[in-house]
Amino acid sequence: MTHLPIGKIVKSNSHIDYVCQVFGQGETLHPPAPSAYGFGSFVAVELETAGEPSRALVGLVYNTLLMNPEFGALGPRLSPRSEVEIFSPDYLAETATLLGVIAIGWLDVVGQVHQGVPAAVATVNCLVRRLERTELLTFHADDAGQPQLRYTPLLLAHNHALVAPLLLAVIDQLGELFPLSRRRLTVMRNNIAWKSIVQPAG
Amino acid sequence: MNSQPVQPIGTVKGPGETPNDYLLIAPDPERRVKHGEFVYYLALIEGETREILGRVTGRRPVKLLPDSFLADPGVPPATVAALLGYESEATELFEITVRVLGFHSAEMGDFINPRVPPVGGAPVFIATDALLGQVLNKRPRGGRGSAFLGSLLSRPEDAVPIALDVRGFTGTHLAVIASTGSGKSYLAGVLLEELLMPHNRAAILVVDPHGEYSTLQEMMNLGEFSEGNYKPRVRIFRPDQLRVRIDSLTVGDLRYLLPNLSEKMHYQLGRAFNFAQRSARNGHYTLEQLLYAVRQTAESKKESEGFDEDDPTTGALVWRLQSALGHSRIFHDFENLELEALFKPGQCTILQLNEIDRRDQQVIVATLLRRVYQARMDTAKGKLDRGDPSHLPYPVFCLLEEAHNYAPANADAVSSEVLKTILSEGRKFGVGIGLITQRPGKLDSDVLSQCMTQCIMRITNPIDQNRIAESIESVGRDLLQELPNLSKGQVVVSGASVNTPVLIKVRRRITPHGGQDLDAPAEWLQWFAQDRAAEQARDQALFVEKKIQYEDDGDVLWA
Ligand SMILES: Nc1ncnc2c1ncn2[C@@H]1O[C@H](COP(=O)(O)OP(=O)(O)OP(=O)(O)O)[C@@H](O)[C@H]1O
Ligand SMILES: [Mg+2]
């Protein structure tokens, strides 16, 4: 069963750096639980497929941002929140959760997976959903069934404070998906942990 | 190849500083990749997978915990790392330098360097005991021509036995070098034991200035040493049994033995010596005849027909010859130590030179070596009959303790010249020399560099270390650095008798070691433990003699 959409693309900062707005109350029947879009979650950005080779982008949640126009309005509130929900629901919708999603690969129409910078571009309002476990497995397995992390340089080049923890989170997920390859994943994990945890603390 | 799969211990990083070095990276949590350890990688050489052996020469940590993690000695730094979320055990990584030896070729009996560095990323393995036992030794332990010296230091005791090639060191000479008390004599004892085992049966002479080799006599009683009707023989010549016939001394020996010769005396001694030789019947003459020759060749003799007793040069020469030779127990008119008695296969002859004056020692050694060398040359050239006492139809090996006395650097000794001759030419005629010294700096450097097998033990003195570095090329810099850190009984063997320099722990001797250090406190306490009678008797005695009982030759003086 495909996961329900958790949100939609609302903007991009670059070819691979998208912003997804999480569906809030009233926008969908089943608003997603926060655990569905946590840091390091893999998502699929569904593309317009008509005649296109790519079906979806594969992305990784690397950041979140809360929007709240009410922030900074220090005046007293006349009506309690429970009443606002009833009397002016569109006002509530102005608060939003935004996700930073970095595109790290794509799924093509014939079901093949690719890691790296996708050629295709997502458009505003493209739906974003969580990647399923089987998709996650096929996305990361090479032809021989061994895990691959070819998008790592992409992440490392993405100059962001959370890149190292993001990689650690990814490797930890892969360790569960590929228990037989834990030894090589550990080498990579230790390397990143040493450089991001031990060395900066010295 | 080894049948069981071996886990690699590291991965090739790339080439090292020289074309013969490469670097590898290893986590080495069990500390197995020690200095001097042997490792190998696999390479395809002419269609065959070969183990390319190398020796670890350097080790450098490349992943160090920050210094500030070490701030509190009570807190292990790994726990600080864990505190921050680095929980792996893998906190260490080493860059290891390996000097390539090559793969061992059975046909060549040697290592062949592939001259191509390993590919980066290739796995590196620790050489198994079995592999090392095969490739480090020229001969299998206990096989003919092998001298089992001990086992590889970097492995558990007896895991990799190392046997020297006896042909190597008896042919092209041996040097045993170490600071005092490091175990040179002990190691020499081990070598002598091996040389007299049934698989070697060597003809050996030991020059023993401290009387510490007499315990080798035990060999005659021990089962390990006999086979069939073979049993080694150990003959000990004590100082009072040593004889050097006066007519076997050269004019050089005489000049050396006589103190403070004037120019005139030098000249006259030479003439007298020639006179004695010319007039000697079948080459033999006595001290009296030599003195007669001195008188006959006096300057004054030319002018007046009669002999002038007052000629000062003649008088002084006669007096000097009398005191140097006439009052000596060693220099003798008729008796001589016969080579036949000294050298025989399966026999170890020990010349105890304690209590003998240094100059006399040098003359004894010089005359003996000269005669042995001459005898071997003459025998080899077919000049001697079977019946001749100098007929020596087998190679011999002579071991000299305190060798710096017989070929000192920057000083002359009568023995230097013959020693140098034998060291450079002896291999042609089967005269092998083993030199033992605690001061290589005091040993003539030519002499040292002629010894093609070297056993080097702990050396702390930097002058001696430099001398070794200068005269011995086969020991690598990495092994030389180890020398001050070796402990008793650990030895670096290099040169002609091993395939590659190895660091060995010398095996235990089968016979007891004779050179025990004196235990002064024990002896002082002993003094009080004696009853009064014994005490008084001892008070009156001039010398304290300690006796060890032996079955064959009775008492042996222990000094
Ligand atoms: N391999 C060994 N195993 C056990 N003991 C040893 C070993 N080598 C040496 N020793 C001990 O160390 C002491 C000194 O050894 P040894 O007499 O051989 O030293 P050395 O180098 O000949 O000294 P010197 O310069 O005084 O002649 C001896 O008491 C000996 O028993
Ligand atoms: Mg000694």
Image: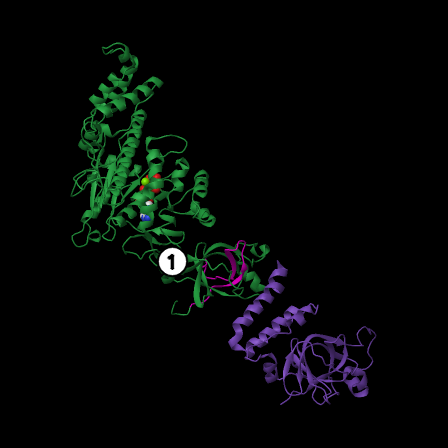
Residue B330 part of the magenta segment = no
Quadrant of res A20: bottom right
| Amino acid found under the numbered disc labelled 1 | Met
Specify the chain shown as purple. Answer: A
Residue B221 appearing in the image: yes
Q: Which residue is mark 1?
A: B108
Task: Describe the element under mark 1 as helix, strand or loop.
Answer: loop
Camera-side residue of B483 and B270: B270
B11 over B227 or under it: above or below = below
Colour green belongs to chain: B
Determine the chain carrying the residue at label 1: B
Give coordinates of residue B162: x percent, y percent: 34, 54
Task: Name the quarter showing ligand 1.
Answer: top left
B170 left or right, relative to B96? left
Q: At which x and y percent is residue B317?
A: 28, 18
Instruction: Give the x, y percent position of residue A23.
Output: 73, 84
Q: What span is colored magenta in the figure? A: B6-33
| Residue B17 within the magenta-colored segment of the rendering | yes
User: Is there any visible trace of residue B327 in the rendered image?
Assistant: no
